[in-house]
Amino acid sequence: MAELHIRNVSKSFPGGVQAVDGVTLDVPDGQFAVLLGPSGCGKSTTLRLVAGLEALEGGEIRIGGRLVNNVPPQRRDTAFVFQSYALYPHMTVAGNMGFSLKMRGMRTAEIRARVVETGRILGLEPYLERYPAQLSGGQRQRVALGRAIVRNPAVFLLDEPLSNLDAQLRVDMRLELIKIQQRLGATFVFVTHDQVEAMTLANLICVMRDGKVQQTGPPEELYRKPANQFVAGFIGSPRMNFFYGRLARRDGQLRLQVDSVSIPVPGEGPSAGAADRPVVLGIRPEHLQLAPAGPLELTVEVVEALGSQQFVYGSLGPGVTIVAAVDPRSKPKIGDHLRFSIPLDDVHFFDGATGARLPD
C-alpha cells in the first residue's frame, strides 16, 4: 500500500475544455479519499490521470513516493474499478477475478489461492464457479472489486462503482466497502457525485467544481466549516438555506436585510468589513430550532415526512424560502406558522460576490 500525491495536475480536451485545472491532493497511506462534485467537475478525469488512462499535461503524480507521470498504466501499481462491472460473460467468477494474474504469468496454484482468499473476504466463496449472468447486481459489483483486490495494488481507484445499484443495495455496498477497506488497510480513491455516499465512506473528501479543488478535509470539517458557498451547499441534505442581503445594525441589533424580510443575526456576525456589501447568511435545516418566540416565522407550504426525519418547506416572506428539520411527532400542516431561532454556533457567512467564507 502507498500514499498518493497529486501536485498541480492539469488536463484539457479538444475544443478548449479545461477538465482538470491545477488539482493538488495528498492522500495518506491507508486512507479512504473521495473526489466529490457535480457531473463535469473533473473528478473522473483526475482519477483516470492517476491511473494513466489519460495523458497528463502538467503537474506531478507520485504513488508511494515514485513519480509516475510517464509510467504506463500497467506499471503504476493501481487497480481501477469502473462504473460498469465489465465482467467477461464467458468466464466464471474465479476466472474473472484471476484473469489479470494469469496474464502476468502467475502460477495456477497461486492464482487459485489469491482468488479463494479474496472470495472469502467478499463473501463470494459459494459463487466462484458461477457465471456473471447467474449473479445479482451487488454480487457482480463485488466480483469487479475482487478483480482489483487479487492484484494487491498500491492504490485502489473506484469510479462511481455503486451508481448502477438500486437504493438499498447501494447502502449495503457502502457498508461492505468500508469493511473491506479497513480489513485491507489499503489506500482507496473513490469518485462520486453523491454527498451522502462521500460522507459515509470517506476519511478525506476533496470537493471539486469546474476542474478545480474547492476544499479538502475530513467530512466533519467540510460540514462544520465549508470554505465557500459552493461547498456549503453541496455538503448536507437538504442543502443549506442561503439568505442574500446586506448587513446593517439597527437599534443595537445586527440584521441581514433580505428583500422585505429583516433577519436578526446572532452574535456579532462576520468581521466589520462585511458591512454595507452583499453578504450571504447560511444555516442548515437541521440547525434551525423551533422556538415559540423565535425571530424567523415560517409559513409551511410543503411537508416532507421521511419516518425518522421530517422537513418543512415554506417562506419567511415574498421571495424568501426556507427548509427546516422538525420533530416528526410535531405533525405540522400546510398553512401552519412556525417560529425558529438561529443558533449562534451554526451560522455561516459568505461574501455575496465571491462566495468565499467570511472570517468569523
Image (cartoon, rainbow, N blue to C red):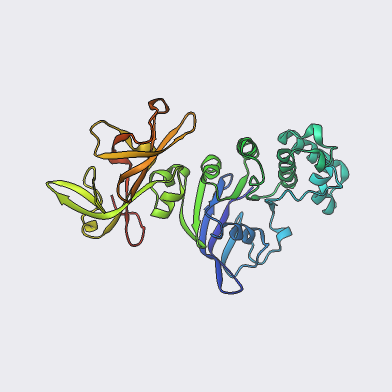
297 left or right of 77 in image? left
Q: Is residue 342 visible?
A: no
- In the picture shown, does residue 150 fall above or below 230? above
Query: Residue at horizontal 84%, vertical 44%?
Result: 95
In the image, farthest residue toward the bottom: 15
Q: Is residue 225 left or right of residue 204?
A: left
How far across and down, in percent of the image, does residue 220 sit?
Answer: 44, 42
Q: Residue furthest front?
A: 335
The picture places residue 103, in percent across and down from the top left corner, at 83, 54
- Judging depth in this view, the residue of 128 and 170 nearest the camera is 170
Q: Name the residue rendered at 82%, 37% in the picture.
A: 128
Which residue lies at the image location 22% right of the left edge and 58% below the top edge?
A: 273
The residue sitting at the top extreme is 329
| Residue 325 sits in quarter | top left
Give the image location of residue 44, x and y in percent.
Answer: 60, 57
Q: Is residue 242 left or right of residue 140?
A: left
* x then y, percent, for residue 87: 78, 48
Q: Say whether residue 41 is visible.
A: yes
Can you name the residue that lies furthest to the left here? 251
Figure label count: 0
Q: Is residue 176 above or below residue 154?
A: above
Q: Nearer the viewer, residue 311 or 85?
A: 311
Residue at image location 40% in from the left, 28% down from the top? 331
Q: For this view, does 360 lie left or right of residue 93? A: left
